[in-house]
Amino acid sequence: MSALKRKRGGKGPGGKAKKVKLVENGNKPQTTEMEQNKEITVPAPVDITTWTNWRNKERVLVFSSRGINFRTRHLMQDLRTMMPHSKADTKMDRKDKLFVINEVCEIKNCNKCLFFEAKKKQDLYMWVANVPHGPSAKFLVQNVHTLAELKMTGNCLKGSRPLLSFDPFRSEFLCFFWSQPFVDHVFTFTITDNRIWFRNYQIIEEDASMVEIGPRFVLNLIKIFQGSFGGPTLFENPHFESPNAHRRVIRMATASRLREKQMVKELQKLKRVENKEAVTRDVTDDVFATPAEERPVHIELEAPAAKVVKKNKHKAFKRQRKQTR
């Protein structure tokens, strides 16, 4: 059926005119306002903030590539727990191109995507994309600690709505964290040391005292692209250092320390091999030499006379002294 309605009795594309039906009185039936108006009316855009019955239609696909470890798998499960509007999918083959994710999101009816990409079984990258038109951002994920690992005392209602605390990059993550209309915890995204630090806190009382729930991780921004999983580069982080370059710097520092130790050992060997000077005179011999007059040497040829010991006759014997006591 065509979008535009023509009047009854008018000529169609074939040139034939339809017969006008008559009612009992012989008059033409009255036409409605919609039939008289041939133009399509487009409704005005709806403001979501003023719509009380608004329902969240955002769906986030959270999945990963093959080669992730157990920590990444637990982190993905924690993110799905925090976002009740998320969906899961099987792991994607590492040989597939990233543009395939757009088709997967279309099949799953998702318009947002969190994709974890593992490389070398030790580096973890996270893609945050608005499917299918973009933009998208690529992050390096560091310092991952899951809920099961932290064992924090905080707790909150599953699927409840969080307060979002952002630094000046709010527009990128705003559409990813919608949930039920009940606020009892806070998601914080803080920029420190040129990185984004994620924390999840429970609101305990009205005085804003909070207890951490988990998980926690750090995002190091690499690039922001105009399209979904590709396209022109909108922003590139000048402070980013790839994990390969960082490991190379560590290896070079370790190798330089080993070279220094080896050079010290070689110097010690050279010192031992060098000819040492023979010391003919001890310098410490004259330390205790003091000036004094020389005395003639007297040699005794006869033995000295024996000394006569006189006994005290009036002294009592030892046995008598004991008896007198």
Image: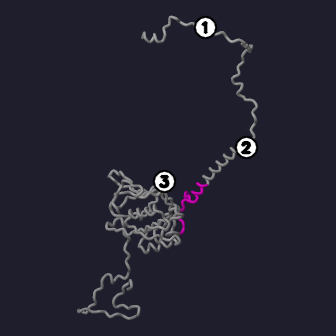
Q: Secondary structure at mark 2?
A: helix
Q: Which contiguous range is marked in magenta?
A: 231-251
Comparing 146 with 187, the one in front is: 146
In this rendering, is residue 228 above or below 26?
above
Give the Cα distance between marks 1 and 3.
101 Å
Cα–Cα gap, marks 3 and 2: 56 Å
Question: What kind of residue is marked 1?
Answer: Val
The Cα atoms of the two marked residues, 2 and 1, are separated by: 69 Å
What percent of the width, then of the height, locates residue 221? 51, 60
**Looking at the picture, which amino acid does disc 2 mark?**
Val
The residue lying at 38 percent from left, 91 percent from top is: 11
Tell me: residue 64, above or below residue 145: below
Q: Residues within 10 Å of mark 3 (few under 14, many from 20)?
A: few
Which-is-in-front pick, marks 3 and 2?
Answer: 2
Q: Nearer the viewer, mark 1 or mark 3?
A: 1
Q: Residues within 10 Å of mark 2 (few under 14, many from 20)?
A: few
Q: Position of residue 236 (x, y in %)?
A: 54, 62
**Amino acid, disc 3:** Thr
Pointers 2 and 1 in contact (CB under 8 A)? no
247 in magenta: yes
Q: State the mark number for residue 273.
A: 2
* Residue 155 horizontal/vertical position (percent): 35, 56
For marks 1 and 3, the one nearer the N-term is 3
Please give the residue where the numbered disc 1 appears in the rendered image. 308
SS for callout 3: strand
Residue that badge 3 annotates? 192
